[in-house]
Amino acid sequence: MGPSFSTLVTGGTGFLGRHLVERLLAAGRHVTILGRTPAPDLERRGVRFIRASLDDASAVAAACTGIDTIFHVAAKVGISGPYQEFFKTNVLGTRALLDGARTHGVRRFIHTSTPSVVYNGQALADADESLPLTTDCPSPYPLTKAIAEREVLAANSPNLRTVALRPHLIWGVGDPHLVPRVLARARAGRLRIVGDGKNKVDMVHVENATDAHLLAERALIAHPQDQFHPKGDSNSVAGRAYFITNGEPVLLWDWINALLKALGESPITRRLPLHTAATIGAVCETLWHTLPLRGEPPITRFIAAELAKDHWFNLGAARRDLGYVPRISMAAGTAALVASLRASRP
């Protein structure tokens, strides 16, 4: 790969998106970002910035002109909210991008999905890509992301090669979402151990998630005529989805408490049974749906399940087909995160 490959990154100013853009620039690539948040620093370095949202179909289509690879990282995320708002961005936005890609002859489409597309209400232990996409989830985010992933993979053709990656709980230095929210809730005394506190959860360091995206593009370039084959055919990459994690599932609450301890914070000790948390979540969902309450509810049925149950995944397919090997371990990533958080204290 070289400068001849032009790339479009949706959500290129977000956490994962910016890491991906930085890596593409370092490789001498021509980069266009489609997003809503300007990035003057990146524009000064030659990045073309198109300020638009995914629901602007004409702008989305135009952004695909002259592009060889699309990294579709942007999405509407959240634990609750009007379904149509998630559908507009996650489904209609993805459709517009696929239409633009086909119209303008884009060759490769790497879609950032999520493991929650296989939500089934059960614990997921060593889960692989054979699980069906969810059609019944008490959260609009997994539902709409599942629809989008299905359509991305269905769009795979000899002219447009598609692949979906499912990174789980992206974190690392500079994370603006996952760890800051955990710390804020812990410091406010609003965090509880849900369930028995022994659930194992996979996470993925942002550098590893970035590696996976670049490896997926490399695999599509290496096999441009690769057709979709049944699961188990090691020659197939296009038309597939892949779980992406650190491959080191942790006991979620032990990891959170170790992080708090390293930062001199009090550990989480108060507990809440899963059925109680789910009941409170259902009540919160109703209140936030019927009343003009701001922000997101403190808990939902979906989040209660995520906090209490196993969610870890088999990396066999990603290792085999993409050559994916996590570079940043949980221990090394956590140490760097702790050092950064300590240094950033006032």
Image (cartoon, rainbow, N blue to C red):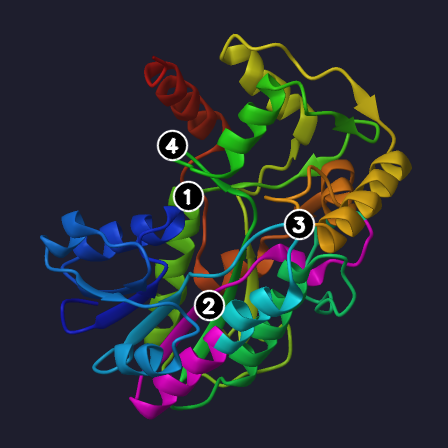
Please give the residue where the numbered disc 2 appears in the rendered image: 111
3 or 2: tag closer to the N-terminus: 2
1 or 2: tag closer to the N-terminus: 2
Please name the residue shown 47% across and 26% down the image: 334
Vertical position of residue 9 compared to residue 328: above or below: below
Vertical position of residue 253 compared to residue 320: above or below: above
The range drawn in magenta is: 93-122
Q: In the image shown, does 246 or 119 lie closer to the viewer?
A: 119
Question: Which numbered marker is on residue 292?
Answer: 3
* Residue type, numbered disc 4: Val
Please give the residue where the numbered disc 4 appears in the rendered image: 173
* Residue type, numbered disc 3: Pro
* Residue type, numbered disc 1: Val
Label 1 element class: helix
1 or 4: tag closer to the N-terminus: 4
Tag nearer the camera, 3 or 2:
3
Question: Which numbered marker is on residue 48?
Answer: none
Query: Quadrant where the C terminus lies?
Result: top left
Classify 10 Å Cα crowding around label 4: few (below 14), some (14-19), many (20 and above).
some
* Residue type, numbered disc 2: His
